[in-house]
Image: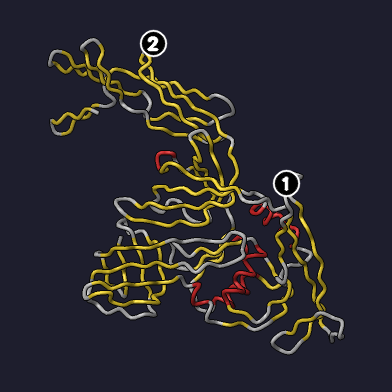
Amino acid sequence: MKVIIDQTTYTEIKAISFAPQTDLTGDSVPINEFQVDIITDDEISIGQYAMLYDDLDNLWANYWITYAEHINRETLRVMAKSPVAILSQRRLPAEYWSSKSVTAAISELMGTMPYTLDSSFANETLTGFVPSQESRARLQWICYVIGAYVKTFFNDRIEIIPIDTTETLIPIGKTFWKPTTTYNDYVTAITATAYSFTLGTPTVTDTYVEDSNGNYYIVSAQKVTLTNPDVPSAAPEKTITVDGLYLINNDNVSGILTHLSDLYFKRTEVDLDVINNAEYQPGEKVIVYADEDKLMTGFIESCSFTFGTQARASVHMVPTEGKEAAPLTITYVYQTMQLGKEVYLFPVGYTYTITNPYIDLTLSQYRYVYRPLNESATGTIVEGENTDTEEYDIALEYHNGILRIVSVDEVSENEGVVTIS
């Protein structure tokens, strides 16, 4: 890993702390940060960007330096926070919006801040009232009602992107054993308040809001409840209440409740450690091995990284649920002889590609190396038992100090040099 500050690259670094997170419910817009100790006697000022890269020049974070002090003569400790922290410094006026485009609303709250709004939100509009609030709070309100989340890691800007339900399998070979599963209380229902606003002069009995131009809007409110159909009858009541978010209206409340039910009505969470060189990031949906014979699927909420030869992450997933799986048995054969087999567990519908190994066996003082006729075993997992037979041929035979080449994948010649592979 390395850090670049003001066009200076620092490779002598240690004690890196980086634990990005996101909130798919929209209840918050987390301020992510990283901390690093740099071996240098340089003086670095706050208020500039620090970029965290891996050794392959992949960007992990581009954050604003909020702390830079020497903890001893040769070690500088730097803390940097995501650009979301800067949004908290700017306050916006109270306004009533009638079909205001999401594009315009995001542009106004971002100002000159680098950002990307996913194109899927280009035609989205917002109707309701926004009070005087910090830009960060307004961003949170908008993301809540459009079903977006904020990503400020592995990029150089603030990204507002939709929740993607595409699932990625984290291989069991990248998973440290053993993951833990936590069971929370059932959420029995979600109640959201939908609002409408009428410009006018309120009476003493009216509920009203005032914009920054002194205009009054009379507020009408209606509570809408979505009940969890899968709650056992003996479960205690637990209701999630969404109130006071004035961008929720009768047109979007149903979609918001449906989105929230996908997150709150599932009650399990999974924690696991995986090898993670930025392949698996907060906000993504993944399938993991919760046990040797059990798969779980859910969204990554946070990753706490530690760094060595490869990066390792403590991953927190929420919410999660069981994933239908089926076994796959790959059998390796030479003519009628079985050379070996491997058994896997994969999600139903998963398309697998597994490299076939070369197999080295000694039989009656003869040593054989068998080569696969296909480079990989491929297929799609279906319900029930799955089998895949991979054929082999003898590549090498060794006996009494003599090595005999029986068959090869390829022979090539270049300027008198013969290459066998």
User: Would you place residue 359 above or below residue 7 in this image?
Assistant: above
Disc 2 and disc 1 in contact, CB within 8 angstroms:
no
Q: Residue at x 21, y 76 (%)?
A: 73
Q: Residue at x 17, y 13 (%)?
A: 399
User: Would you place residue 413 above or below residue 264 in this image?
Assistant: above
The residue that label 2 is drawn on is: 336
Picture coordinates of residue 102 (x, y %)? 64, 69
> Which SS class for mark 1?
loop
Q: Residue at x 81, y 82 (%)?
A: 199
Picture coordinates of residue 138 (x, y %)? 62, 74
User: Would you place residue 207 above or below residue 397 in this image?
Assistant: below
Visible residue check, residue 123: no
Picture coordinates of residue 236 (x, y %)? 73, 51
* Residue type marked 1: Val
User: Would you place residue 228 above or below residue 405 in this image?
Assistant: below
Q: Is residue 369 left or right of residue 115?
A: left
* Residue type marked 2: Thr
Which image quadrant for residue 198?
bottom right
Visible residue check, residue 411: yes
Number of numbered labels in the structure image: 2
Q: Is residue 324 left or right of residue 231?
A: left
The residue that label 1 is drawn on is: 231
Quadrant, the C terminus: top left
> Circle 2: is it few (<14), some (14-19), or many (20+) Cα within 10 Å?
few
Label whose residue precedes the other's in the sequence (2 or 1): 1
Tag nearer the camera, 2 or 1? 1
> Which SS class for mark 2?
loop
What's the mark number on residue 397?
none
Picture coordinates of residue 363 (x, y %)? 26, 12
